[in-house]
Amino acid sequence: MANFTNPHSPVDIDDPSAQTPILAGDGGLSVRLDETASDIGDDGTQSGVAARGYWEGIWNRVKRDKLALVGGAFIIVLFIVAFAGAPLAAKMLGHGPNEPFLVSGGLDSEGLPAGPWTTVGKLTESGDLVEQKFILGSDSTLARDEFLRILYGAQVSLEVGVGATFLVIVLGVLFGAIAGFYGGWSDTLISRAIEITMAFPYLLFVIALSGTIGPSLNNITFGGVLGEGVMTLVLIFGLLGWFYTARVFRSIVLSLREKEFVEAARMVGASNSRIIRSHILPHLVGPIIVLATLSVAAFILAEAGLSFLGLGVQLPTASWGSLLAQAPQYYTQRPLLMVWPGLALIMTTLAFNLLGDGLRDAFDPRASR
Amino acid sequence: MGVRRTALLALAATGVLSLGVASATAAPSAKGAKGGTIVVEFSSDVDYIDPQLSYYGETWKLEQAAACKLMNFPDKEGAAGAIATPEVAAGLPIISNSGKTYTFTIKPGFKFSNGQAVTARSFSDAINRLANPKMQSQGIPFLDVVAGAQAVIDGKASSVSGVKVAGNKLAVTLTKPAPDFLARLTMNFFAGIDTKLASQIDANGINDYASCGPYYFSARTPNRSITLKRNPNYKGSRAANADVIQVNIGNDVDVEFQNTQSGTTDYPSGGIPPTEWKGLVEKYGLNKKDGRVQVRSLLDIRYVAMNHQRALFKDNPKLDKAVNWAVDRQAFSAQGGYLYGKRTGQILPPGMLGYKQVGIYPIKVTSGTVKTAKKLADGNLRGGKAVMWSSNRGVAPLQAQLIQYNLKQMGLDAEIKLLPRATQFTEAGNAKTATYDLTIERWGADYADPYDFLNILLDGNQITNSQHNNYSYFNVAKYNKQMLAASLLVGPSRGTAYAKLDKDIMAASPPWAPLVNSNDRTFLSNRVGCVVINPASGAAGPSLNVLCRK
């Protein structure tokens, strides 16, 4: 029975001695009845019953969830498009996301942003006009490439989403594990800190911090790798968002602490840090993955919201939120300017949520019954 | 009488009589149906509604409806509205003492909304309150010619010795003749105040006070709303058509536009999406009598001020010039939409006494202008980083990004900081909080005289530790002296002197990059009429006390 809950000793399916006739859907193990499973040998012994590994079981369950797969695939494509596709597109199109094309073509005869598939002219240093394409038209009366700004906006969203999630998970696991495992005064301190942080009006605090300490952090770009303002949002979201994950991990660790394998590890003389590292943390991988995917979606939305309010990434860095903020000015003449960034935001958060839901179902032992 | 003729000449000398800025179009109907509520929208909150403190165009629209003054601009269009005429004063003042003493007689019958009578003391109290250093008012520079004001400003006296009240007469003595003094009195800083407000000295401003104009401020919720109601005790000749003027604060321009289209808002003072103007003019026509779309030229300028107290632009005239070569005035104007304004590269606006077109800087960017900007900037960038302030409303963020792009082309990397408008100019006017290298600003004439542009905005002596309007912190002794000398001149020589200053300053060490002289564009709902627009009053948009429900 211990094998069910100990993921780092999965049954080796190639080792006949490790095979056990355990029903599918119980814990992390299941029996795959392959062609040889029902073979009864001449001596009457059963042979060829293969058991699945923990991760294999999870993957099988994820595979059955088509929506999660679609979400996952979308996310992979999004990363590729954002970090490889955007610079490639900029190179192929011949201009960047922040270049205004006011000289020729970027605005129509009414002074409105040019529509999709417009040819624009770029003024070179020698005074020549070079023709280039705007696939989705101009973003505003500043006549910048909407298509490129959507792509580069994806970079910002993913950087903030993943960065903040990483920070939140690290802090949440750290504090949650300490509070749950050690208990006592450390649990008291950390639990009170969680409650105090939760009592703050989160959004107002984020807005206030963005406006005050934000400007001094905006220039942290790690040599231009991150957009200006990304680090500010990562730190603010991370430092204010860890309490929820800490609570979740604290409760998981509290239950794990009482398990027999922990007791067994203590009995053989393992230190607390070793127990946490080698026996507790592996059990948190599943919840970490689930929480992470759901958190990324939430932080992407939060970043868009702050950028919409003018408190997110610095101008002129493209962000889906800032694109949405300026689009309503043209809602009667260029309604698509609201659609593109809105659609990108919806699809991205949906993809992360679908993947997160699918992973949660896959990791939850009860879900497969 | 000779001395009153002198007063007329004084008005003429400031160019007030020659003001052609509020070009008359169809004659509006000033009398209309009384009653109802006029709904106005502001995109962002005002600075104050306290008359001795507020110095924001939006607030002045409201205060123009609530204040009563010794001299005021009538609620009329065109030339008729451009002449400062006696309001509470029984007539033009008697000017004596070699042009340094102005004696006004107060007309009986004016009352505050709380029933208190308006007397000579109401105006002497206003001047004393304005001068009180605890008020930290931006109107203090306009007291520079009043005898005894400086002693109060410096904290050495408790009242302005040059202001005397004797019965229904008010005498103001100046330290030197000031041809624009009567025009200064039309500013809301000099509006009459009751005894209660006179005793309330608070730099944060008073929101609850009695007014003596057609309306009074009945309520204010910061960042939410302001309500004006008709002054029941007003017996003056100005119109007070609506019962209530309701100001709602905080909507974006696209929401204000929708509300005006649907009729829930009558006047979107915060503006409308700039791309809508052309369609509106085509649909409703332009400047028709009581028409929905009205455009007037303004004595106004939008500019980028370079902060000369910070290291980047301090004693760096080549970089100042580089900015003037780099900025794309055409694109900046294009962001504002149809009939936004006229591009400019100089300080004084067209129509102002002393304006003379000089083409020092280009009003259209080409590859050649960018090269010139780079050449001027080369070696003078001092690290190449800057902080640029801008308003966070309407097209301002887009315009800021445009300027940022222009500056980047010449090698200067500017970080944009967006601020609510009132916060932007309040902090810019304080040396301690002016932590920008550039700020995108706008200035509308308080009255039609070049003193209100050059001296107020560029005289280094105006820079104080509290509120002032010299956002470029420009302080060159030679020009300070010339500005002072020009302010004492009368007639054409005044215009000539200011024209020379404009050209010399911009050519040698431009404190700004002037961008556009804006138009006053007004879009109204179909529920209102009695449209009178008089930019001479210092408040753009329709006169709210005249606006009426159809």
Image (cartoon, helix red, strand yellow):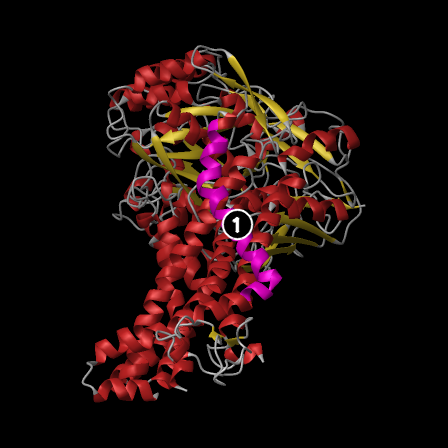
Please state, as top left, top right, bottom left or bottom right, where the N terminus of chain A lies in the image.
bottom left
Say if residue B443 shows up in the picture: no
Q: Is residue A65 magenta?
A: yes
Task: Name the residue rendered at 20%, 86% in the picture.
Answer: A268
* Relative height, residue B248 to residue B415 (above, below): below
On the image, the x and y values in percent for residue A244 come to 42, 72
Which residue is more in the foreground, A284 or A220? A284
In the picture, measured across the screen, residue B257 lies left or right of residue B362, that is right
- Tag 1: amino acid: Phe
Of B294 and A183, which appears nearest the observer?
A183
- Quadrant for the C terminus of chain A, please: bottom right
Q: Is residue A355 left or right of residue B547?
A: left
Magenta residues, dominant SS class: helix
Depth check, front residue: B378 or A164: A164
Q: Which residue is mark 1?
A: A308
Q: Label 1: state its secondary structure.
A: helix
Residue A102 on image: x %, y %: 55, 23
Q: Picture quarter containing residue A11?
A: bottom left
Chain part drawn in magenta: A62-91
| Residue A4, image x, y percentages | 42, 81
Report in which chain the residue with disc 1 lies. A
Q: Quadrant of residue A176?
A: bottom left
Q: Residue at x 50, y 11 (%)?
A: A128
Which sits in the foreground, A289 or B164?
A: A289
Residue A34 position in % (x across, y down)? 54, 71
Q: Is residue A177 visible?
A: yes
